[in-house]
Image: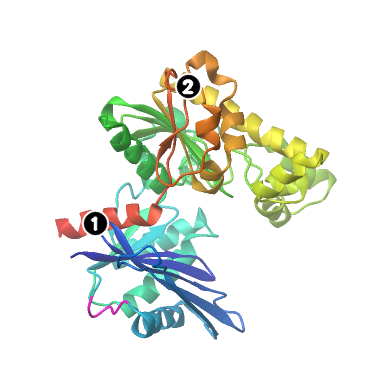
Amino acid sequence: MSVVLVVNSGSSSFKYQLLETEDERVLASGLVERIGEETGRIRHTVTFSGAGPAAADAEYSRDVAIPDHTEGFRQMLDAFRTYGPSLSEVPPVAVGHRVVHGGARFFEPTLITPLVEINIDELSALAPLHNPGALQGIRAAEAAFPGLPHVAVFDTAFHQTLPPAAYTYAIDRRLAEAHRIRRYGFHGTSHKFVSEAAARYLDRPLQDLTQIVFHLGNGASVTAIDGGRSVETSMGLTPLEGLVMGTRSGDLDPAVLIQLARRAHLSIDDLDDMLNKRSGLRGLAGVSDMRDIVQRVDDGDPDATLAFEVYLHRLRAYAGAYLAQLGGVDVISFTAGVGENSPRVRAGALETLGFAGVEIDPDRNRARARGIRVISTDASRVVVLVVPTNEELEIARQTMEVVDAL
């Protein structure tokens, strides 16, 4: 039995999952949060693996001082000892780490070495909100599991197949090269998992399919995939470009920032904060959760109605653009929190694509079910799917690819 511990670290928290990779079963999961605050919290869930319809996962939580990631990993290990499963009975063979930004240096899962850590640190200039936290988690995990291989899985890696015409910005070329300015794309782990899961579900060769995958959560992106390769994606140098998101603006005329700096006297930090934390759905309607937006639309709120229409307008714009880039599409998939759970968003995003052979079945779209499901009609020339994403499983799979090659 091969067990992998998957870690997703931020600056003040980290999530973890212990997965058995042969039957792809989650043994335990948890969240360590409020690191560095006066009181932190750890939540640990043991996944019940026995028989019986009344079985339920066992959840535990406690508040405790967690000054840094190292202490957070000590608390995690204590939770495994106290609540299970015992890591001596199901010892992990490796630790897989999610790293948001790999730049143009990392295009596959990578065994972490001191040189790799230096590179992740240097790439913090491109992802100052993400890479430093990932590096803290890596170093704390290495201290907690010194004898295991540690593997970095990069969100940007799947998009390293983008052609130059897709990743190049039309600015001064020397300046762009000097400062590594280009489109990198994100959510790659999810886009890879979903596109491969869709091909398996349809029992069709991945290399024969053209696909569009909408990853719609608080952060949102869309990717055009040809034969399993990312050929266009909406996020760019950072996760700010592209679709309207919960708190991020998505696409914006750069002159808007110049105008706000000149006329509203906003600093670079002010603009950064506005675009990432006070824009998107929150900026338009005051709330960032799509469930709240839909409820307010039903209540007749004009701000929420406009926000919802802007959100859908951007989805349709990208769907049409990627249809053109691919020359038609075989499969469109929706994933992540909004994509998996909002029939209104799915229907609205595709309602103008009948010309391309896209037909949504209203009953299938509204039906709630677990697992992959078809929401298009039987007559639709394009198969439309809802595909639950599982980034942790994808990280575990890629981690084992590295371990098996050692």
- The residue tagged 2 is 323
Which quarter of the picture shows residue 20? bottom left
Give, as a single range, the part of the protein colored magenta.
85-89
Identify the residue at image location x=45%, y=19%.
380
- The residue tagged 1 is 23
Q: Amino acid at mark 2?
A: Leu
Whether residue 222 is visible, yes or no, is yes
Above or below residue 311? Residue 406 is below
Q: Outermost residue, right direction?
A: 263
Above or below residue 180? Residue 49 is below
Q: Amino acid at mark 1?
A: Asp
Which quadrant would the C terminus be assigned to in this image? bottom left
Above or below residue 328? Residue 397 is below
Please give left or right for residue 236 compared with residue 74 in the image.
right
Confirm whether the magenta stretch covers residue 86: yes
Which of these two is toward me, 346 or 155? 346
Which quarter of the picture shows residue 230? top left
Which of these two is toward me, 114 or 275? 275
The residues tagged by marks 2 and 1 sit, at their Cα atoms, a distance apart of 36 Å
